[in-house]
Amino acid sequence: MNKKILEKFGDSENCPIRNILDRIGDKWSMLVLLLLNEEKVLRFNEMHKYIGTISQKMLSVTLKSLESDGLVQRTVYPQVPPKVEYQLTERGLSLIPHLQKIAEWAKQNFSAITKSRDEFAKVS
């Protein structure tokens, strides 16, 4: 076994690739980031309506994770009822071109991949 490869990829806590991709590669984070890039500033309920299939709890968890990573900024306005808005930080904005490339690749390859999955399912 190659020790260098094991050291490079074996420790998920200290491997930047695994650590970061685990976070942004979940079911919702990439969608939230791309949505915030398009709309610039959104309130929680607006995001929930745009995404549609995400539960309020999962959206809340996703936003907190993205905020803790410094990708999303949450701004609370002191009024009644409270107004809370979300937007991308500079770090979040720096990630967007890479996510857009992944999204474009997914669009270009979606049909072929779903076809491959169907064919694989028939054989398995």
Image (cartoon, rainbow, N blue to C red):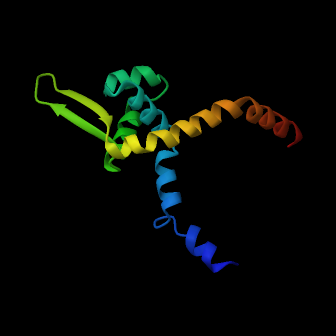
Q: Image check: 68 left or right of 124?
A: left
Q: Nearer the viewer, residue 33 or 80?
A: 33
Rendering quarter of residue 96: top left
Q: How far across and how far down the image is residue 64, in percent?
A: 33, 43
Q: How far across and how far down the image is residue 113, in percent?
A: 74, 36
- At 52% from the left and 69% from the top, the residue drawn is 11
Give the tally of numbered discs.
0
Q: In which quadrant of the rendered image does the C terminus lie?
A: top right
Above or below for 104 versus 90: above
Rendering quarter of residue 95: top left
Q: Image check: 103 left or right of 44?
A: right
Q: Image check: 105 left or right of 24?
A: right
Q: Residue furthest right?
A: 123
Q: How far across and how far down the image is residue 9, in percent?
A: 58, 67
Above or below for 85 versus 25: above
Q: Image check: 96 left or right of 86?
A: right
Q: Nearer the viewer, residue 97 or 22?
A: 97
Above or below for 93 versus 3: above
Q: In which quadrant of the rendered image does the N terminus lie?
A: bottom right
- At 41% from the left and 44% from the top, the residue drawn is 94
- At 29% from the left and 32% from the top, the residue drawn is 86
Above or below for 15 versus 28: below
Q: How far across and how far down the image is residue 101, in percent?
A: 57, 38
